[in-house]
């Protein structure tokens, strides 16, 4: 890094930032956005036809693209995959089991008065777990539960994004094996622009026979690759305040003024701006040490459904949202302390293989 470069800034403080807080806020925005659907109160606030939850997911993906690309540069191919699986899968699996073994029976008792037929009525609890094991969510309901709520037969409408996030992990895993990708940000920019072009022309790919999963991947992939581009730029030049302010203004303008693909094309700028904000906005010490955002994300929807089932939505949206936040935080903390953190510590404790071919001393 050189101070003579006109866009140079300070090295990104990987150990002293507020990304845990930012991710938690994004997870809370997803809960807020889903509250309107789940409580039967319409679609809630939207920007360019996308609810706030969709934009929060975009924020998740740009930050994840930044952090996951760094992980790919700093670990061997095998360790990278092991770390990614350990971070996302154990808590996901436990969430499926808890939904089928705890949440589902509670709903059956409230709605039907007994557990008769719960384990044998399709979709059975075991079918729910088995059908969703591969992250690709194909089954949302369990037996005769959630039939009486405004958003029926859907136990977790948030988990679908995890499949596409893991596909993004694999794409960065493959790109990271390419030496040029490590030496220059040009390949990352090209990959990002290609992903945006595919999304801009997604109607053509659908006419050529590509299904909805292909469209969803290319709706989210530009955000992830935008984060990867931001990582490569920041590793070389650091974070410049004025460039960050300009990036945020450009991102906001693109999202507000360009329908369909404005958010995707602005994602490197959105990533750069959010990363800068994470260096100047402080976060509580407890959140800095404990990242409960993933647990919050995966448990919010079922807690929201159960709250509706018990009539919590009848007290008005503010009270309903507050109840679901409290319940979700409790489960997110349990997930972090008993599943996520122990799994990550176990994997990292086995030793990693740091790469020497990083692009900057601060990596």
Image (cartoon, rainbow, N blue to C red):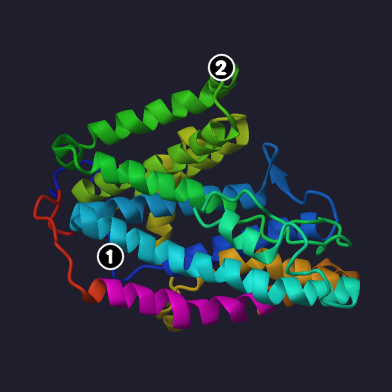
Q: Circle 2 — which element?
A: helix
Q: Name the residue under label 1.
A: 13
Q: How crowded is mark 2: few (under 14 residues within 10 Å), some or many (20 or more)?
A: few
In percent of width and height, residue 35 lies at 75, 61
Q: Is residue 223 left or right of residue 96?
A: left
Q: Is residue 184 left or right of residue 310?
A: left
Q: Mark 2 points at which residue?
A: 204
Q: Is residue 137 left or right of residue 115?
A: left
Looking at the image, is 224 positioned above or below residue 239? above
> Residue 343 colored magenta?
yes
Q: Let me know if residue 245 appears in the view.
A: no
Q: Let me know if residue 44 appears in the view.
A: yes
Q: Residue at x 28, y 65 (%)?
A: 14
Q: Main secondary structure of the magenta part?
A: helix
Q: Give the range drawn in magenta.
A: 327-347
In percent of width and height, residue 50 lies at 67, 42
């Amino acid at each position: 890094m050189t101070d003579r470069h006109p866009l140079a800034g300070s090295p990104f403080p990987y150990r002293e930032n507020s990304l845990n807080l930012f991710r938690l806020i994004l997870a809370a925005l997803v809960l807020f956005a889903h509250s309107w659907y789940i409580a039967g109160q319409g679609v809630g606030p939207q920007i360019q036809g996308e609810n706030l939850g969709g934009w929060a997911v975009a924020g998740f993906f740009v930050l994840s693209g930044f952090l996951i690309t760094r992980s790919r540069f700093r670990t061997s191919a095998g360790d990278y995959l092991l770390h990614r699986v350990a971070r996302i899968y154990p808590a996901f699996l436990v969430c499926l089991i808890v939904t089928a073994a705890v949440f589902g029976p509670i709903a059956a008792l409230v709605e039907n008065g007994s557990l008769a037929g719960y384990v044998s009525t399709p979709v059975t609890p075991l079918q729910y777990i088995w059908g969703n094991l591969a992250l690709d969510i194909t089954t949302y309901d369990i037996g005769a539960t959630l039939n009486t709520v405004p958003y029926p037969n859907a136990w977790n409408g948030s988990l679908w994004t995890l499949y596409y996030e893991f596909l993004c992990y694999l794409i960065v895993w493959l790109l990271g094996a390419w030496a040029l990708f490590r030496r220059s940000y040009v390949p990352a920019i090209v990959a990002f622009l290609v992903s945006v072009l595919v999304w801009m022309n997604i109607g053509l790919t659908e006419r050529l026979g590509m299904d909805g999963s292909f469209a969803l991947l290319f709706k989210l992939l530009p955000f992830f690759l935008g984060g990867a581009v931001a990582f490569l730029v920041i590793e070389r030049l650091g974070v410049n305040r004025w460039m960050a302010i300009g990036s945020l203004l450009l991102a906001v303008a693109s999202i507000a003024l360009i329908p369909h693909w404005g958010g995707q094309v602005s994602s490197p700028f959105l990533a750069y701006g959010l990363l800068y904000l994470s260096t100047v906005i402080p976060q509580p010490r407890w959140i800095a040490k404990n990242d409960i955002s993933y647990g919050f994300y995966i448990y919010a929807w079922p807690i929201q459904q159960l709250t509706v089932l018990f009539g919590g939505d009848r007290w008005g949206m503010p009270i309903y949202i507050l109840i679901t936040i409290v319940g979700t935080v409790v489960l997110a903390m349990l997930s972090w302390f008993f599943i996520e953190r122990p799994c990550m510590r176990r994997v990292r404790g086995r030793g990693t293989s740091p790469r020497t071919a990083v692009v900057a001393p601060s990596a």
